[in-house]
Image (cartoon, rainbow, N blue to C red):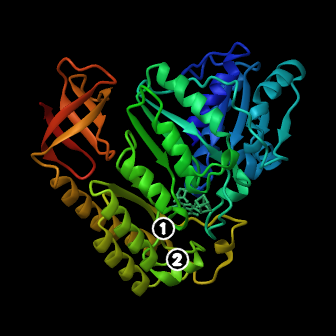
Amino acid sequence: MNVAESERMAGQLQKIGYTLTEEFETADLILFNTCCVRSTAEDKIYGKIGEIKKYKRQNPALIIGVVGCLAQKDGEELIKRSPHVDFVLGTGQRGELVNVVETFEFKRRQFVDVSNVSGIINDENILPIRAGQVSAFVPIMYGCNNFCTYCIVPHVRGRERSRLPEEIINEVTETVKDGFKEITLLGQNVNSYDGGGKTFAELLREVDKISGLKRLRFMTSHPKDLSDELINAMACGENICEHIHLPVQYGENTILQKMNRVYTVEKYLALVKKIRAAIPNISLTTDLIVGFPGETDETFAETLKFLEEVRFDMAFTFIYSKRSGTPAANFPDQIDEELKHKRLDELMKLQNKISLEKNLELNGKVVEVLVEGASKTDKNIYTGRTRQNKLVLFEHGTEKVGDIIDVKINQVQTWLVKGARV
Ligand code: SAH
Ligand code: SF4
């Protein structure tokens, strides 16, 4: 989401004459687009903001702005902690960035506005400067109404607002015309999309018809809202990829309830069964949190058992991070940091074993790969992804970025598979 929004802010700023640079030393404006979902993200940002103070000393005309979730959360406090920051703009006011920068250029007076977290963001006339060449993110909604008890997102992103279907279809059409092959529709909970009275499944079906689009993905789905209509749209879709990121967060009911996830382990398992029956070659990935308040050896053991039962293709695993202002921050029975780490290691070990076993199923098989380009470490090795979102490495021949090719897998690891073009 932040990558997508940074691309849009770059687009906004280009309209008033700025161009992108990687060089801090020569930049006229440094903009931090921030996250605060876990305290580690927050600490990192404060560290980075501190680090760039020296550039301001070298170049007093330099403008430093902070936007995104941490900006929304800390507001004035951020300027107090880091007085070299010139402006702080909240998540719901991203659309006002150009005004804020232009006003600052003129007045040079510190500025904080985080007053409208649920503000309407009009992206219609902004051409994002996209980071990739093949794959593009298109936000379809902002905010979240779910209030999982550990999560700060609804507090810093405001209430759910859906973009209109026409706007989304227009953006995807233009992006595909620009040569992008793959589109990922983004939202905190795409299944509760309701732009212009359309459901998410209806939107997905319409986007799927856009000519020239090769792959359609979406993120993220809350298990409580994943409808039969969506499963059906995926099963019948043309370019909708066989992958669902379906964060479960935990594999035991008392903790799920304390998390306010509104489903049970049994319901989640039934949903997985239904999805796999309708789309047999689906890959399923998830998010998991360990160390949530009240976790015990028993609830953790249940979660390991749950992982063995579902057998996710991959999982992002997080240590519970206390976010002030969220209910769980005040729950009793907070877990000791050392124990959290120990459990995380155990969880990751098990999931890594399962991910490797899942990848082993691909050995010897031919998969369809969308070519993304040379790997970072070796120009002769190219990378791409399967429709199931598995990372594939192969020796570069004549294929170009954006081609769709067949690769026969001959070696697998936990996080990627390797093969040769056939
Ligand atoms: N809207 C998405 C995810 C948003 S945040 C969803 O509901 O799936 C991304 C992930 O960060 C979450 O899935 C969760 O696993 C993790 N997360 C959120 N708050 C957290 C916290 N306080 N501590 C640790 N992990 C957290
Ligand atoms: Fe956070 Fe839950 Fe909303 Fe996801 S659904 S953003 S985890 S509150």
Q: Quadrant of residue 308?
A: bottom left
Question: CB of residue at label 1: within 8 Å of ligand 1?
Answer: yes
Q: Residue 178's x, y, as percent? A: 49, 19
Location of residue 79 with respect to 23 vertically, above or below: below
Residue nearest the viewer, comparing 285 with 288 = 285
Q: Residue 86's x, y, as percent? A: 79, 32
Q: CA distance from mark 1 to mark 2?
A: 8 Å
Q: Secondary structure at mark 2?
A: helix
The reply to whether the C-beta atoms of the residues labelled 1 and 2 are less than 8 Å apart is yes
Residue 144 is left or right of residue 75, and the answer is left
The residue that label 1 is drawn on is 249
Q: Earlier in the sequence, mark 1 or mark 2?
A: 1
Residue 54 in view in this figure:
no
The residue that label 2 is drawn on is 256
Q: Secondary structure at mark 1?
A: loop
Name the residue located 76 percent from the left edge and 30 percent from the top edge: 97
Q: Residue 376's x, y, as percent? A: 32, 29
The amino acid type of the residue labelled 1 equals: Gln
Q: How many marks?
A: 2
Name the residue located 69 percent from the left edge and 68 percent from the top edge: 326
Residue nearest the viewer, comparing 46 with 248 = 248
Ligand 1 lies in quarter: bottom right
